[in-house]
Image (spheres, rainbow, N blue to C red):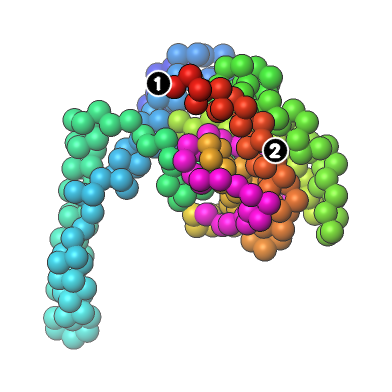
Amino acid sequence: MNCRDVREVADSFLSDQLLTETNHEILQHIDTCPSCRTELDARRRLRSALRDAFNRAPELQPSAEFRNRLRDGLREVPVEGARRWALPGRWLALAAGVVLTAGLASAVFLSRGDAPNPIAPPDLLARDAIGDHRNCALKFRLVRMPVPLEDAADRFDSAFRLLLSAPPDEIQTRDGSARVTERHSCAYGARRFGHVIMQYHGRVVSLLMTANDGAADTIGEGAIPHLIGRPMNGLSVVSVDGTHHSVLLVSDLESAELAELSKVVSVPLAQHLEVSLAPDLGRLATLSP
């Protein structure tokens, strides 16, 4: 597969619409082609930014009046007898409205030049976490190669250095042990993660640390892990939020089981992170005008 072939199917690749064999050919190509790797990364970031802009733009949200009219109109739609023909027309009109709204979202985003909000909405953060878990821990289908944690701490986020030793390689819980199999930094779309891959009860679990400034005012000893977003393809995300980072667990474990594991793994790490960053934040405060 050459560069032209890759770029012709790039959007289908990013949407998981290609055959496994084609995906492998693309991955083999981008491993040795920085130009195509950059192109795919740029398209992924643009798609993510457009979705974010649409979700955040107040002027693109349906008004209460529109929602009421739509609800009342759907109630009046006949679905049997001679008037059944009316249903497709109404649905086509609704679909046209959705397409128009999506187009307006793209136009507004591109014209304003807005950058993605550094505080990721929980559903978007969960989606990125699930995407990284699937592509990196389950399918080994990363567009960008993983980066050693030490290098990632120097280049992207000093907090990633904590993941060199935390959590420990063997983690004891009341329901059994979890074992760390891999530590690195990787990216999904525009989001950079510190990534620790674990095996627990025969399942793959991803611990992901990412910057999420202002996610929470503080984190104390009573921090409670909470589910974010919606489960996708059987995968759930449990988050513990600090003042500048979120620590996430992603797996196909039952939600309650994942939350219990998060209490043992994510909460201590998030608390350690708060303490380790406090001196740096204090020094920054004294330097501020």
Q: Name the residue rendered at 36%, 34% in the picture.
A: 116
**Magenta includes 181?**
no
Mark 2 nearby-residue class (10 Å; few <14, some 14–19, many ≥20): few
Q: Name the residue rendered at 40%, 24% in the picture.
A: 42
Q: Name the residue rendered at 30%, 45% in the picture.
A: 56
Q: Name the residue rendered at 28%, 31% in the picture.
A: 114
The x, y position of residue 82, in whole percent, is 14, 83
Task: Please tell me whether mark 1 or mark 2 is closer to you in this view.
Answer: 1
- What residue type is disc 1 on? Pro
The x, y position of residue 118, in whole percent, is 42, 35
Residue that label 1 marks: 289
Label of residue 272 in the image: 2
158, above or below 268, in the image:
above
Quadrant where the C terminus is found in the figure: top left
Residue 94 location, quadrant: bottom left
Q: Earlier in the sequence, mark 1 or mark 2?
A: 2
In the picture provided, is 202 more to the left or to the right than 142?
A: right
- What residue type is disc 2 on? His
The x, y position of residue 288, in whole percent, is 44, 22
Residue 140 location, quadrant: top right
Mark 1 nearby-residue class (10 Å; few <14, some 14–19, many ≥20): few
Residue 29 location, quadrant: top right
Callout 1 touching callout 2 (CB < 8 Å): no
Secondary structure beneath label 1: loop
Furthest residue to the bottom?
Answer: 81
Secondary structure beneath label 2: helix
186 or 81, nearer to the observer: 186
194, above or below 3, in the image:
below
Q: In the image, which residues are magenta?
A: 203-228
62 or 92, nearer to the observer: 62
The x, y position of residue 160, in whole percent, is 64, 28
**Magenta includes 220?**
yes
